[in-house]
Image (cartoon, rainbow, N blue to C red):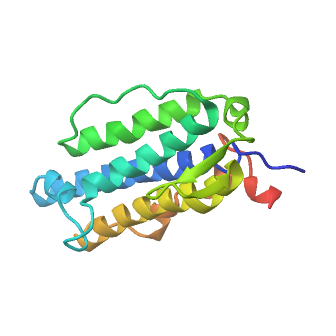
């Protein structure tokens, strides 16, 4: 059995972005219950030299979309709305999810023969498979994980299962990719 570029990218990004949107909705709800603006969370960071929550959310969405656009050659529609509120950040994540779902697996897989130069120096070159496995997915998960950690650090009542989401066997939208590994 073979595994494709689409198999290791789109479902991974989609599931984690879905979970991120749920985390943000929980954070928004809990902020309302506690009587403070959820926008305060968006300005929070773990350390002064790190990006704030807002940028972590945006980077996760951008990395997922950029990876799929580079593999498929399709241009993602612009997200022109300014990101100020928690609802707008959730909309940004959902916009990216809609884009990912709109790209056919064959279009993603068409990038299999491409080579990628990695930022920031653009001196390190990878195949499409290496780009996904060693750059795009780890970079994406760094930002999603950091967003989760910022929320936890600020007292949002979320846990590991919120980060992981539902067990994959309960999600009929995606096949059990673990069976391929």
Q: Is residue 68 above or below residue 55?
A: above
Please state if 130 lies on the left or on the right of 18 as rendered.
Answer: right
Q: Nearer the viewer, residue 73 or 25?
A: 73
Residue at position x 90%, y 51% from top? Answer: 1
* Residue 100 horizontal side relative to residue 89, left or right: right
User: In which quadrant of the rendered image does the C terminus lie?
Assistant: bottom right
Residue 26 visible to the viewer? no
Total tally of numbered discs in the picture: 0
Given the current orientation, which residue lies at the most extreme front position? 123
Q: Is residue 73 left or right of residue 43?
A: right
Q: Position of residue 61 (x, y in %)?
A: 42, 45
Residue 73 position, x and y percent, is 59, 29
Q: Position of residue 138 (x, y in %)?
A: 54, 62
Q: Quadrant of residue 135?
A: bottom right
**Quarter holding residue 104:** top right
Depth order, front residue of 58/163: 58
Residue 84 visible here: yes
Residue 137 percent coordinates (x, y): 56, 57
Q: Is residue 70 above or below residue 168?
A: above
Q: Is residue 112 above or below residue 163?
A: above
Q: Residue at x 41, y 33 (%)?
A: 95
Residue furthest to the right: 1
Q: Residue at image x 72%, y 33%?
A: 110
Q: In the rendered image of this protein, does residue 12 appear above or below residue 102?
A: below
Left or right, 155 with respect to 77, comes to left
Residue at 21% in and 34% down: 82
């Amino acid at each position: 059995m073979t595994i494709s570029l689409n198999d290791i990218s789109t479902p991974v990004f989609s599931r984690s972005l879905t979970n991120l949107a749920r985390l943000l909705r929980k954070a928004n709800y809990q902020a309302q219950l506690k009587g403070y603006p959820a926008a305060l969370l968006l300005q929070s960071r773990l350390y002064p030299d790190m990006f704030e929550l807002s940028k972590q959310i945006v980077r996760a969405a951008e990395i997922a979309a950029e990876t799929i656009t580079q593999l498929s050659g399709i241009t993602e529609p612009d997200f022109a709305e300014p990101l100020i509120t928690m609802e707008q950040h959730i909309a940004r994540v959902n916009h990216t999810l809609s884009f990912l779902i709109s790209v056919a697996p064959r279009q993603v897989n068409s990038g299999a023969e491409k080579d990628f130069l990695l930022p920031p120096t653009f001196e390190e070159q990878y195949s499409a498979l290496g780009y996904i496995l060693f750059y795009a997915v780890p970079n994406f998960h760094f930002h999603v994980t950091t967003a989760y950690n910022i929320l936890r650090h600020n007292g949002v009542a979320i846990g590991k299962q919120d980060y992981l989401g539902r067990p994959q066997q309960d999600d009929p939208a995606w096949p059990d990719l673990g069976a391929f590994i």
